[in-house]
Image (tube, grey):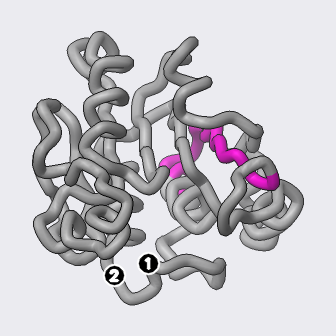
Amino acid sequence: MKYTEPDIDTAYHTSTIGKSLYDQVLLHKPKKIVEIGTLHGYTTAIMAMALDELGGGHINAYDLFEEYPYKHPTYDGTMANIGKYGLSKYVTLAKKGLDEWLAAPEDFDLMYVDVSNTGDTIDAVYAGVKDKIEKGAVVLFEGGSNDRDKVEWISKYNKRPIGDAKAPFKVIDENFPSLSMLG
């Protein structure tokens, strides 16, 4: 399936992050993707579209769903969003948070993290998967640009900006909210 902008609730409709993420999947040709923070399934659907174009692969997509105390999707709603594009065969959806996943990280070829990322988040992810990156795995995440670090909630909740992370990363799409790669 060629890239199609999914009609799924997201703040990314006005950015290029969806297409950039799709292109990264095509470039790296992962057999197994891990996504932490799928929300309504927008980025999951995009990565599954790329897997479909590649002819195979699978995504283990995690979120807290109804267990997250703030704005959250439902598990069933997210699965329905992925299903309406005929992509369910590429996705296993499960309830799990980043900290729980990092306590027992699974193998992957490509990982995408979007959990209200901060410098602390990126450092924790890097520490948890550095060995996998050194073996060739790719870790992408939402954020990393200067504009993204200026979002209101970073200062309001006294969070460390991603730019202050110790983990090495490069921004691969500067368009807000930006897309970056660890390593």
The reply to whether discs 1 and 2 touch (Cβ–Cβ < 8 Å) is: yes
- Residue closest to the eye, 157 or 48: 157
The number of callouts visible is: 2
Q: Does residue 40 appear in this view?
A: no
Seen in the picture, residue 89 relative to 12 is either above or below; the reply is: above
The answer to whether residue 159 is left or right of residue 103 is left
Q: Residue at x 62, y 36 (%)?
A: 97
Residue 173 placement (x, y as % from top left):
19, 65
Residue 161 placement (x, y as % from top left):
21, 53
Q: Residue at x 51, y 55 (%)?
A: 47
- Residue closest to the eye, 157 or 141: 157
Q: Does residue 77 appear in this view?
A: yes
- Which three-letter amino acid code belongs to the residue tagged 1? Tyr
User: Which span is picked out in magenta?
Assistant: 51-66
Q: Quadrant of residue 169?
A: top left
Residue 124 is one of the magenta-drawn residues = no
Seen in the picture, residue 71 relative to 158 is either above or below; the reply is: below
Residue where numbered disc 1 is placed: 12
Q: Quadrant of residue 183?
A: top left
Seen in the picture, residue 38 relative to 72 is either above or below; the reply is: above
